[in-house]
Image (spheres, helix red, strand yellow):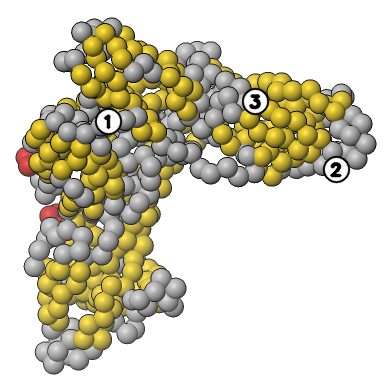
């Protein structure tokens, strides 16, 4: 049985292909109401019927009619649906790419009529778009009928009218798992904004678009694969992939800066050491407390770091920084207040307490999140404004921020070579008045070629981004003559 439209398999995340899910013994959920139901094995029957569907390109939540002939009369079957689970893969400092594993679930139970036919319907489950196999499993654990459905994306928007400086919230369902269907891009009045993914969010993406410029505007959601919108998708091998056009209106408002928050403070507990809180930003403080250490000892508090870059022969390496000198008391306790140095963010830094002989006697960790330092509120037309961030990471998937200027992508900045510090220079262009700079997490480079997700804003960063959590920064400034 071939997949829809002559496709015997589909490329998954540019890494591997899917074998026929119902062509070998598979474990399937027997309970339609709960993932915790008992499991049965599905094996292919010697002869299989076809599952014929009424709509080869439905959307998530749509009801699809289907027909199966040649079954046993008055028999009960489970309707099986092919599922996927996506992950971001990294290898140390390197972004590898996205990958997907397959599974199967039961979405309905049906009974054939006296002639051995089934005429029924099912609702397309929430999940990834792209090709999904469907099948009927009989009481003996054999798959006796098989077919396929290609689920295409659908788009909705919370509100079509927002005050200037606010945000339109857009939702996409049914983003695919294949290399050429797992990413979309957003445009604002024909200006490229960035990438939309749903690798780890089950094919569902939510992102925001800045309400820029009073008046009528167009938000477009466009297929992409090699780093740029594909404007004639209807003539491609994936012509079923839709393009979406959403008219919106921006009203008069009072724009303000908006910065994402970092997680609430919490301690980091290690071996004989606790950092409170265990995360923060450059320039913030934390208290390092130790217990059950050697008594009355002079110690050094050290901090692990990664220095260098990904683009020169010098490369990068680990380093140690001395944070403070301290002493334990007669009980072996220690307490020191530490100011977070200018350093890379990303993965947590290891903190070590080292005695005078060089022995490590206590460890814990501390994570730096990127933070906004400064940006001018007013700039003369044509001048340079500098946006200052700190805490950029060392990895190819957390070392860069991508920049939008009035909702158009203009470039990116990297902080690895400068110890996490990014001083981003932007020319102030456009008419006198309010303008916007939006800085989003992105991926600098990696092994994955398709889809190409590099150095454009990852608009779905909040829920679907490899590596550590990173905030976005939305800045408002005024151009003066």
Residue plotted at (65% across, 37% down): 365
- Mark 1 and mark 2 lie on one chain; the one further toward the N terminus is 1
Secondary structure under badge 3? strand
Percent across and percent down for residue 349 are 62, 32
Compared with 194, 125 (above or below) is: below
The N terminus lies in quadrant = bottom left
**Residue at mark 1 to residue at mark 2: CA–CA distance:** 53 Å
Within 10 Å of disc 3 (Cα), the crowding (few <14, some 14-19, many 20+) is some
Q: Which residue is mark 1?
A: 255
The residue carrying pointer 2 sits among few (fewer than 14), some (14 to 19) or many (20 or more) residues within 10 Å by Cα, namely: some
Above or below, comparing residue 55 to residue 364 in the picture: below
The count of marks equals 3
Residue matched to label 3: 339
Q: Quadrant of residue 105?
A: bottom left
Task: Give residue 58's quadrant in the image.
Answer: bottom left
Of the two numbered discs 3 and 1 on the same chain, state the one appearing first in sequence.
1
* Circle nearer the viewer, 3 or 1: 1
Left or right: 403 with respect to 110? right
Nearer to me, 391 or 304: 391
């Amino acid at each position: 049985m071939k997949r829809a439209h002559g496709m015997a398999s589909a490329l998954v995340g540019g890494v591997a292909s899917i074998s026929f899910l119902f062509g070998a013994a598979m474990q399937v959920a027997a309970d339609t109401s709960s993932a915790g139901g008992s499991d049965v094995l599905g094996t292919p029957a010697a002869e299989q019927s076809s599952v014929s569907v009424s709509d080869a390109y439905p959307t998530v939540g749509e009801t699809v009619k289907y027909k199966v002939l040649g079954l046993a009369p008055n028999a009960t079957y489970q309707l099986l649906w092919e599922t996927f689970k996506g992950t971001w893969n990294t290898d140390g400092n390197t972004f590898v790419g996205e990958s997907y594993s397959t599974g199967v679930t039961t979405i309905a139970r049906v009974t054939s009529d006296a002639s051995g036919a089934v005429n029924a319907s099912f609702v397309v489950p929430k999940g990834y778009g792209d090709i999904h196999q469907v099948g009927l499993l009989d009481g003996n654990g054999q798959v006796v009928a098989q077919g396929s459905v290609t689920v295409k994306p659908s788009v909705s928007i919370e509100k079509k009218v927002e005050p200037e400086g606010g945000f339109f919230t857009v939702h996409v369902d049914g983003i695919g798992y294949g290399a050429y269907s797992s990413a979309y891009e957003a445009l604002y009045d024909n200006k490229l904004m960035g990438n939309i993914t749903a690798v780890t969010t089950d094919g569902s993406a939510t992102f925001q678009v800045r309400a820029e410029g009073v008046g009528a505007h167009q938000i477009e959601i466009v297929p992409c694969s090699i780093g740029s919108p594909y404007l004639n998708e209807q003539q491609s091998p994936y012509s079923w992939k839709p393009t979406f056009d959403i008219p919106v209106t921006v009203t008069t408002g009072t724009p303000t800066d908006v910065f994402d928050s970092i997680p609430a403070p919490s301690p980091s507990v290690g071996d004989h050491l606790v950092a409170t809180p265990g995360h923060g930003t450059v320039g913030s403080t934390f208290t390092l407390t130790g217990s059950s250490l050697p008594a009355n000892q002079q110690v050094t508090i050290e901090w692990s770091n990664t220095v260098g870059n990904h683009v020169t022969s010098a490369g990068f390496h680990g380093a140690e920084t001395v944070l403070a000198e301290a002493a334990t008391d007669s009980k072996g306790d220690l307490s020191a207040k530490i100011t977070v140095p200018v350093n890379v963010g990303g993965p947590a830094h290891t903190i070590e307490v080292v005695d005078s002989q060089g022995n490590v006697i206590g460890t814990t960790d501390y994570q730096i999140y990127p933070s906004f330092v400064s940006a001018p509120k007013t700039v003369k037309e044509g001048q340079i404004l500098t946006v200052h961030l700190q805490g950029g990471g060392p990895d190819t998937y957390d070392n860069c921020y991508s920049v939008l200027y009035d909702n158009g992508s203009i470039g990116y900045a990297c902080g690895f070579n400068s110890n996490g510090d990014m001083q981003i220079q932007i020319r102030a262009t456009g008419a006198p008045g309010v303008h916007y700079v939006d800085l989003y997490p992105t991926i600098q480079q990696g092994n994955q070629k398709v889809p190409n997700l590099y150095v454009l804003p990852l608009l779905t960063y909040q829920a679907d981004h490899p590596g550590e959590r990173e905030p976005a920064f939305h800045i408002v400034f005024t151009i003066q003559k």
